[in-house]
Image: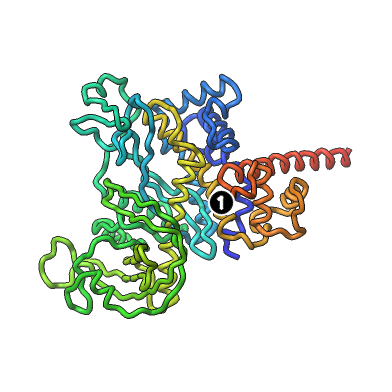
Amino acid sequence: MSKASENVSEWLRQPVEQEVAQGELGDARRNRVAGQIVARLSQQPTASLANALEDEASLEAAYRLLNNEAVGWQDLMSGHVRATLERACQVGQCLVIHDTTEFVFAGNSYRAGLGPTTTLGQGFFVHAALAVSAQGERIPLGTLGAEFYTRPVGPKGLRLGPHRRVKPHQLSQHPPEAGNIPPWPKQSRRWLELMQSIEQQRAGRFECIHVMDREGDIYEVLQAATQFQARFVIRACQDRAAFHQGELTHLFELARQQPAQGQRHIELSERSGTARTYGGKSHPERQARQATVAFSSTTACLRKPDSKGRTPVGIEVNLVRVWEPRPPAAQPAVEWFLLTTEPIHTALEVQRVVDIYRARWLIEEFFKALKTGCAVEVRQHESFHALSNILGLCMPIAWRLLLLRALERTHPTAPASLAFTPRQLLIVAHLAKNLPTAPTLAQALGALARRGGHLKRNGPPGWQTLWRGYRELLLVENGWMLAEKRRSRSKNL
């Protein structure tokens, strides 16, 4: 069992609001209010603040905090980031998965500070780094950092849905946005600065491997990673000029010339088919299926873009190709080109690189937990500042949702003791019907999901039902512990 698996039950027992309440907000009252918001939202992640908070005074305090110019999303996330670093230290080695997503907010009224999105709407973009255990199970550890950005409004104004456009002169009539609105950066900066920040924080504390999709295939990012000796697995997007054994070639051609070192099966998720114009990334539609892929590897030196000669000047990398020799009819074939610093001497080492990249899907689940599990995109706050602050508070809640769901999906047959203490398993047995004496993780979590309102005929449990059932377990456990303390005091009298 990995170190992450050994610590899961401890992480789940710690109140998620405790991380937020220890953030760097500059005032104990702000920390208390932030903790209260997260405590209530963690019980009802999709609820509005008005429904989640108990009284008018708590609601007013929450709105004051979210709109306070002196409090930003970085401050509200600081406690969670620090706790994630501690969890990474406990594990010893982790994957740091980077990606960018957009948050789109509906409505016909403009919200101060938001910019255009890739769809017809207003919103902002988040570039985040999710830590995941590297050994054994891919257990989420939390968020190690994030950057929020808005795209500039063009001369034609801002589209708010298909039938409404706000002109630039109309935007200037709105009240100014509180705080600073981060501008849309050069693409390389998003990936480079967050990686650099994480490398500085983790130095001497734990090992990590940065995992990026095709948007991270930027020469400046690869060069910076090489300079501060960061480890990485990055999917190649550019068919770069490269040197191999002193000969100038191109990356994809070189990879396709290598013989297969073996085959394996991988699970592919369903994809509806989308295109992201801000990253130049396209995803063709496909059905969920199990694919048989081959893999091969070699080494290459990526030629420096401004180098026109035939001298091998550039970045030394290992190159792994993964492809599907016989895809089903009418389905796009899998073909990945992975740039990495990880060893590729044996077939097992190459498969390890492939598995590291396959863990990237977890950050997509994390974004889904924020958007669906925490309902961030349906919140009605009227400014970028307030929306980014509520998103900062939802980050640790989304991690906890992801942690529960990841356990349910990746370790269904593992013993329930992986995530539950003996006392908790006794409580689950009392709350559930027909639970076996030694339940599996799937059986225990299924029992909790049923307590949260899940019906078996509806398929696997979702975010809300798992979380509601788990919160009930913690509530009963707290009552149990209080009863034990009272009984112990009575005996001592």
Q: Is residue 477 above or below residue 141?
A: above
User: At 33% across and 26% down in the image, what residue appears?
Assistant: 110
Q: Nearer the viewer, residue 68 or 374?
A: 374
Q: Nearer the viewer, residue 147 or 249?
A: 249
Q: Is residue 448 left or right of residue 308?
A: right
- Residue 219's x, y, as percent? 24, 59
The kind of secondary structure element at disc 1 is helix
Q: Quadrant of residue 236?
A: bottom left
Q: Quick one: quadrant of the N terminus?
A: bottom right
Q: Quick one: quadrant of the C terminus?
A: top right
User: At 75% across and 58% down in the image, what residue appears?
Assistant: 436
User: Label 1: few (<14), some or many (≥20) within 10 Å?
Assistant: many
Colour scheme of the picture: rainbow
Q: Nearer the viewer, residue 284 or 341?
A: 284
Tag 1: amino acid: Arg
Note whether residue 27 is visible.
yes
- Residue 218's x, y, as percent? 26, 57
User: At 57% across and 64% down in the image, what residue appears?
Assistant: 2
| Circle 1 residue | 405
Q: Nearer the viewer, residue 455 or 63?
A: 455
- Residue 256's x, y, as percent? 28, 74
Residue furthest to the front in view is 329
- Residue 238's x, y, as percent? 24, 61
Q: Is residue 477 above or below residue 59?
A: below
Note whether residue 204 is visible.
no
Number of callouts in the render?
Answer: 1
User: At 24% across and 21% down in the image, what residue appears?
Assistant: 170
Q: Is residue 489 left or right of residue 366?
A: right
Q: Quadrant of residue 96?
A: bottom left
